[in-house]
């Protein structure tokens, strides 16, 4: 039975250093939540506090409504998939998976069945007698997952589980993990610094920075409506352009962006009561076409750098009228028009007004 | 017989030294192989100063050790210091060469009771060095009742307060004395006879120590014991409460001698050394350091009254007897005592 | 993070350079281990003559004598002492090594130094120091007298307890250091994983920590047990030479009893004992990726 987690003012201080500042967060039962943030932001500390390996200096942790703050890790109905997998080298795969069940005194017949089930769940049937040092990275990760899941915890914690895998494997494992969570309906809390992972897997993402939550929400919300500079720039790439309100009529607000671009945006997208803020322009929102020499000067730009990424190209374009302001844009790959957007090419940029996002905080 | 044996490092050192090839040749050298703590350093230095002969001094802690190395090594040693019964066996096996008595002027200094002894009746191969006995030492402050013989030492009242030398042959001899048996007849029958008595005695002993039995007495861990007279003499010097008595049933008297191995190369130097030792003033130096019974009468006249009064150095009366060589029986004795000790 | 297994070419053999570098060690081993062992074996098959010399030959008489209950009893007693010593060293040493390995780095270095400081003094001197502590007028009794004047002085010296104390004291570092090395290599994440899976603080030890530090324990046990069986100096000094152990018996054969062949046979028997114990230890080693 999966449960909800509530972090009620949970904070952690090490002497003078504050790793986590009074976090308030509720994770719903059955939800897949990712704690996303850069290294050292405190996300792992949070995870460890939920697991019970660190005690919060302030606040409480509630599991399914019950306060588990004082309960030691071996008695919490919470299990973890560790970053290095932490498989017991002296036990076989079966031995590893059975460990938690053994600790709980599960009778041998049932234990055997559940271990078989768990191994089947992660597609490791037949490898039960191998030892960890005889397995590949991906296989080890699956053992770690099986070992945790077989105990039927109310919450499963995952600490950067894919960091040791190569890109292809990572993608495959990601899909498997998501399918697993859906199947089990278990509450998953994942810690990662990889935003692709977070966006792909989560029901909700909690972006963590310097010990505090910057924003919590579904992936699309985090991506399309970041609440702060940090979130905007950490999740995906953002061109943050100063934006000034220059007028407005019914339902629309006239905005001038740096670089001279003027747009009419829907009124509800502009943060109320503000005269100026910043626009979050995602690279894929920048429309590019070759400069044909006849348009007004606003929007004219020069391609200064190109980064080939296979399926697309990332371009740095410098606005003529922006005092050198540079945007990152994305151009779909495809060999056809590559020359039009090579370094030194003159392009015209356009930014569609309707889906632009303006930072509420300014 | 000198039993103040070396401790482990000393033994190891002696063994190691014995393995190193010695340059035994070269005039002006003497390879002396003697008991540890029996030949004072000043005596060696005095000899070298006077004669210019360099002394290479090696030590051993048991007759058996000395024999083993001598027999194995050959002509490396010029002078050895066996106990009487060992010398007896060595003479029989032609391991010693006869002495040139003409070169030993000081022979006349020796007391008559120390010459012409059973191991070398004509004194052809050996010259007495020092003598001593194995007897009873009592801390008279702790033990008030008189102790006159072995049986009075090994009583229930003294359980765990006794120290004895860790020498199997000695132990067996005392039992033989106590039973009135001849001490030099060691065979299956005599061993069977002493077994029950010895078994009881061994249970009463607290410490077996051949290296330094006086330590246990000085530390108060034991109150009495049967030890070498030299140890007892040192105890008496330290504190007169330690009295020495020769056991009434009979006591072992040993005479350690100087002798020249058959294969020795520096024979002349060896003779000079022996003669040097026979000098009264040199002999008294030895007595001063190691207060055993000095067989040199001329030296005795140079001793202080205190030294002469030491009951352990010059005990009165007593039935004294020497050990004779018993050959293979040594192994049987060892087995018996090991057995009895481990039965505790 | 658990590293990938290092692929090794199974067909690779040590090259010339490797043999050259190994040569001094092999020569040393041959000269000081193999040859003496062979000499010992040869001597054990000989006999003692009247004079105590070795008569080389081929006779199993000495080995027959080994079966004498006197010596068997002594063997067993020596093994018992050594086992007791090893057990005590484990009991005392394992927790010390464990906490040493998990201490903060600077504290750890200091503590390690303290563990090794006794080696700066000769073994014999340390044994004599124990005599000074344990004897009737020694330091321990002085302390007792000061704290509880009414008590009689403890007669600790020249008892088996004193011998065991001396042995444990001398060999404790030999157990602490290998166990420390083993514990140090223990991945802390494994212990957390065990907790996470429901193992309480007391269950983590037998299920995870013990199996993974077994190589260190095995090494430590060997380093303690083997020398302890043959020990004779400690029994002589601290035990008053009252209870002969196999080391004392062997010493006697070479010095007092002058029966070198028998002593050699005893030595060979001891050697055989150790070989057997090593084989047993190897067989007991757990499967899996435990490399030292």
Image (cartoon, coloured by chain):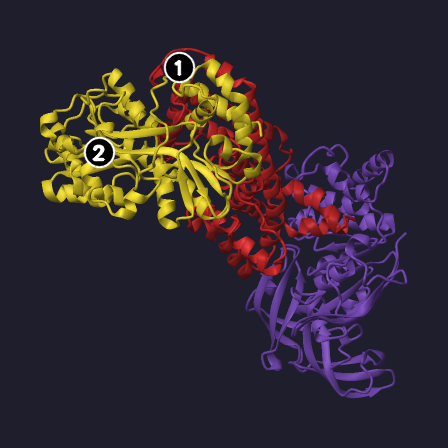
Q: Label 1 is found on which chain of the structure?
A: C
Output the letter for the chain in red.
C
Kindly identify which numbered label has been placed on residue A183.
none
- Label 1, secondary structure: give it: loop
Name the spot of residue A166 as percent of width and height, x first: 64, 49
Residue B7 visible somewhere in the drawing: yes
The verdict on a common chain for dots 1 and 2 is: no
Say which of B31 and B280 sits in front: B280
Please name which of the two marks, 1 or 2, marks the residue nearer to the observer: 2
In the depicted structure, whether residue A275 falls above or below residue B49: below
Q: Which residue is mark 1?
A: C46
Q: Color used for chain A? A: purple
> Which residue does the numbered mark 2 point to in the structure image?
B32
Chain (yellow) = B
**Quadrant of the image occupied by residue C163:** top right
Q: Position of residue B137 (x, y in %)?
A: 43, 40
Q: Quadrant of the C terminus of chain C?
A: top right
Which residue is drawn at the image coordinates 85% and 48% (left, top)?
A: A152
Q: CA distance from mark 1 to mark 2?
A: 31 Å
Residue B322, by quadrant, is top left
Secondary structure at numbered mark 2 = strand
Give the residue furthest to the top.
C58
């Amino acid at each position: 039975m999966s449960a909800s987690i509530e972090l009620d003012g949970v904070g952690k201080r090490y002497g003078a250093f504050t790793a986590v500042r009074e976090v308030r967060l509720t994770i719903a039962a059955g939800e897949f939540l990712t704690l996303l943030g850069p290294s050292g932001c405190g996300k792992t500390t949070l995870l460890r506090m939920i697991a019970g390996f660190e005690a919060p200096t302030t606040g409480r942790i509630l599991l399914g409504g019950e306060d588990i703050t004082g309960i030691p890790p071996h008695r919490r109905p919470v299990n973890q998939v560790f970053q290095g997998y932490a498989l017991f080298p002296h036990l076989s795969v079966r031995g590893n998976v059975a460990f938690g069940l053994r600790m709980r005194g599960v009778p041998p017949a049932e234990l055997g069945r559940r271990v078989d089930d768990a191994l089947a769940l992660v597609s490791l049937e037949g490898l039960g007698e191998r030892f960890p040092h005889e397995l590949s990275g991906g296989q080890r990760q699956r053992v770690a997952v099986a070992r945790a899941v077989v105990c039927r915890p109310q919450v499963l914690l995952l600490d950067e589980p894919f960091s040791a895998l190569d890109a292809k494997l990572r993608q495959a494992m990601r899909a498997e993990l998501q399918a697993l969570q859906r199947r089990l309906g278990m509450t998953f809390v994942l810690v990662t610094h990889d935003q692709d992972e977070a966006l792909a897997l989560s029901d909700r993402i909690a972006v963590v920075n310097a010990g505090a939550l910057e924003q919590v929400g579904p992936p699309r919300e985090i991506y399309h409506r970041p609440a702060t500079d940090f979130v905007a720039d950490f999740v995906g790439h953002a061109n943050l352009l100063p934006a000034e309100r220059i007028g407005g009529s019914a339902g629309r607000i006239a905005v001038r962006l740096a670089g001279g671009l003027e747009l009419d945006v829907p009124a509800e997208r502009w943060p109320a009561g503000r005269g100026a803020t910043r626009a979050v322009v995602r690279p894929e929102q920048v429309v590019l076409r070759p400069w044909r020499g006849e348009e007004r000067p606003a929007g004219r730009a020069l391609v200064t750098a190109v980064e080939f990424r296979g399926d697309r190209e990332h371009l740095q374009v410098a606005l003529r009228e922006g005092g050198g302001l540079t945007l990152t844009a994305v151009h779909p790959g495809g060999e056809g028009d590559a020359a039009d957007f090579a370094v030194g090419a003159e392009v015209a940029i356009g930014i569609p007004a309707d889906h632009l996002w303006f930072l509420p905080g300014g | 017989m000198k039993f103040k044996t070396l401790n482990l490092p000393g033994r190891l050192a002696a063994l190691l030294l014995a393995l190193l090839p010695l340059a035994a040749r070269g005039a002006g050298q003497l390879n002396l192989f003697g008991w540890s703590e029996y030949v004072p350093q000043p005596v060696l230095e005095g000899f070298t100063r006077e004669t210019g002969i360099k002394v290479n001094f090696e030590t051993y802690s048991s007759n058996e050790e000395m024999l083993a190395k001598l027999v194995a090594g050959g002509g490396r040693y010029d002078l050895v210091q066996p106990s009487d019964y060992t010398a007896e066996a060595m003479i029989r096996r032609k391991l010693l060469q006869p002495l040139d008595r003409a070169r030993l002027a000081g022979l006349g200094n020796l007391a008559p009771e120390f010459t012409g002894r059973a191991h070398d009746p004509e004194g052809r191969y050996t010259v007495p060095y020092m003598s001593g006995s194995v007897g009873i030492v009592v801390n008279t402050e702790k033990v008030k009742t008189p102790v006159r013989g072995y049986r009075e030492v090994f009583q229930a009242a003294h359980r765990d307060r006794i120290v004895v030398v860790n020498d199997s042959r000695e132990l067996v001899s005392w039992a033989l004395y106590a039973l009135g048996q001849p001490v030099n007849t060691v065979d299956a029958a005599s061993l069977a006879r002493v077994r029950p008595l010895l078994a009881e005695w061994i249970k009463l002993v607290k410490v077996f120590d051949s290296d330094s039995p006086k330590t246990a007495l000085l530390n108060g861990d034991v109150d009495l014991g049967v030890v070498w007279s030299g140890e007892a003499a040192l105890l008496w010097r330290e504190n007169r409460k330690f009295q020495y008595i020769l056991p009434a049933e009979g006591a072992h008297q040993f005479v350690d001698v100087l002798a020249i191995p058959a294969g020795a190369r520096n024979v002349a130097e060896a003779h000079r050394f022996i003669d040097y030792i026979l000098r009264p003033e040199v002999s008294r130096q030895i007595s001063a350091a190691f207060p055993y019974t000095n067989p040199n009468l001329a030296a005795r006249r140079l001793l202080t009254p205190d030294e002469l009064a030491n009951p352990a150095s010059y005990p009165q009366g007593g039935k004294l007897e020497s050990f004779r060589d018993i050959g293979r029986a040594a192994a049987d004795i060892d087995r018996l005592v090991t057995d009895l000790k481990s039965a505790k | 993070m658990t590293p990938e297994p290092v692929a090794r070419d199974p067909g690779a053999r040590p090259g010339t350079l490797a043999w050259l570098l190994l040569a001094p060690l092999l020569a040393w081993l041959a000269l000081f281990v193999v040859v003496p062992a062979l000499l010992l074996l040869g001597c054990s098959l000989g006999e003692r003559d009247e004079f105590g010399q070795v008569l080389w030959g081929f006779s199993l008489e000495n080995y027959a004598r080994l079966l004498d209950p006197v010596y068997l009893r002594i063997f067993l007693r020596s093994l018992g002492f050594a086992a007791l010593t090893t057990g005590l060293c484990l009991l005392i040493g394992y927790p010390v090594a464990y906490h040493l390995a998990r201490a903060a780095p600077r504290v750890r270095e200091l503590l390690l130094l303290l563990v090794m400081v006794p080696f700066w003094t000769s073994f014999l001197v340390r044994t004599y120091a124990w005599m000074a502590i344990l004897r009737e007028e020694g330091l321990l009794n002085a302390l007792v007298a000061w704290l509880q004047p009414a008590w009689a002085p403890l007669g600790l010296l020249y008892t088996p307890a004193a011998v065991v104390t001396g042995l444990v004291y001398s060999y404790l570092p030999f157990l602490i250091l290998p166990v420390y090395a083993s514990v140090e290599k223990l991945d802390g994440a494994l212990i957390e994983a065990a907790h996470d899976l429901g193992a309480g603080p007391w269950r983590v030890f037998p299920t995870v920590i013990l199996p993974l530090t077994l190589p260190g324990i095995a090494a430590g046990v060997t380093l303690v047990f083997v020398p302890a069986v043959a020990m004779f100096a400690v029994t002589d000094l601290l035990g008053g030479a009252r209870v002969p152990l196999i080391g004392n018996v062997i010493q006697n054969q070479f010095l007092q009893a002058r029966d070198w062949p028998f002593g050699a046979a005893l030595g060979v028997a001891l050697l055989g004992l150790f070989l057997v114990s090593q084989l047993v230890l190897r067989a007991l080693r757990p499967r899996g990726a435990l490399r030292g």
